Image: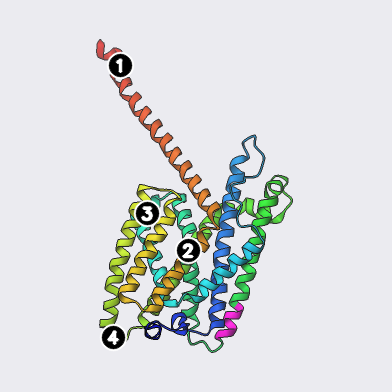
Amino acid sequence: MFGSVLFWLPSISDIMNFEVNLFESLLQGVVSTSGILVLCNLLRVHFFIKAVRKDDGSSQKEPPRLLAGPRPGLGRTLHLCCLISILTVVGPRVASLVVLEFSLRAVAAWVTVGSKSPPSAALQFMVSCQFSLGCALSCSLHFLQEGAPQRLLSLLLAAGLSWILARQSSHLWHHVMALYPLHSSQRYCGVCLSLVASSRALLPLLTHSLMVTFCVAAVAAISIINHHFLSAAEALRFWMPLTICYMLLVVHTQEEQHRRPGGEVVHQTVMVRLGGLLLLMLMVGWWTDVLHMFICFLGEACCLIPSRDLQDAVSQEMAEEASSCLQLNQSTNSHSQMQPESDLVPSKDKDF
């Protein structure tokens, strides 16, 4: 009985199904994890500088405590190892699906809202795109390094440089958290003075960098997915339910964000997105794709749970924007109500 069951189950090598060897997949996981760390550290720097700037005019001179971030230690090391392992195991085909889903959702949000979207909407997308960014870097490296004669050397250089960049961004975040309120007031630290002068350009820089990354990853994802089809009928059989599933996911997530615009909707959106992709893989995918989708749930959890401080900061900024819009609407309504009363007062020329 057990022999017949084991006969139908895929083997471990088929489940992992590495398109390249394990060491190269590990290097791609290191690059992807480094990109996620750089994004989170720079977002924390942005929120911290903004909070310090708000507190400059108030009597409270203590540094803001909302952004704590993961503390260095054994837990931080285990988190990084877990995230690297997850991004190593996830295959390029499933990573491409995650990238296409997030890219389509971002484009739909930009088309729906346009340039009138508040800054908090872009920040919410940045916080929720951590695992999608890791998948984007992974499938971009797989696409760009495919068939390269010095593939291993290139991945080693990319992993080393990306890890150095991640360490530097972590050092920058800890320096800003500890010394930025003092150095920005005393004006004798070059790093803090540079942040004072160019802190407003940090968020547009992150936005444009993510746009370029996901544009390249979308091209790579389409090429990777089409690479596995031998005929146009096979490709059509896959792309038709994929397009329908993506459109339903986009409509649902947009409705949820408009109905409940806050940080608590991020986790539910992730569950709906990955649940829809899991159903799609059960219909037209392989066993390996189904297992990799379950691993993607762990990857999203590894990215979102340690970044609760960023989600709280985005929720606070959304609440501040909502309160400012409400005050603006109330002042506009009161002004419009006072204007007709002045028009009803008769003038002396009309009475005469």
The answer to whether residue 325 is seen in the rendering is yes
Q: Magenta residues?
A: 151-157
Q: How many marks?
A: 4
Helix, strand or loop at mark 4? loop
Q: Amino acid at mark 3?
A: Gly
C-beta proximity under 8 Å, tags 1 and 3: no
Q: Is residue 156 magenta?
A: yes
How far apart marks 4 and 1 lie (CA) works out to 79 Å
Instruction: Say which of marks 3 and 4 sits in front.
Output: 4
Helix, strand or loop at mark 2? helix
**Where residue 300 is drawn, which disc sits there?**
2
Q: From the viewer's perspective, tell me whether residue 173 is left or right of residue 268.
A: right
Nearer to us in this view, 143 or 246: 246
Helix, strand or loop at mark 1? loop
Instruction: Say which of marks 4 and 1 sits in front.
Output: 4
Q: Residues within 10 Å of mark 1 (few under 14, many from 20)?
A: few
Name the image quarter holding the C terminus.
Answer: top left
**Where residue 114 is drawn, which disc sits there?**
3
Residue 38 found in image quarter = bottom right
From this view, report whether residue 147 is shown above or below residue 96.
below
Residue 324 x, y percent position in the rendering: 45, 38
Q: Which residue is mark 1?
A: 345
Residue 231 found in image quarter = bottom left
C-beta proximity under 8 Å, tags 4 and 2: no
Q: Amino acid at mark 2?
A: Glu
The answer to whether residue 193 is seen in the rendering is no
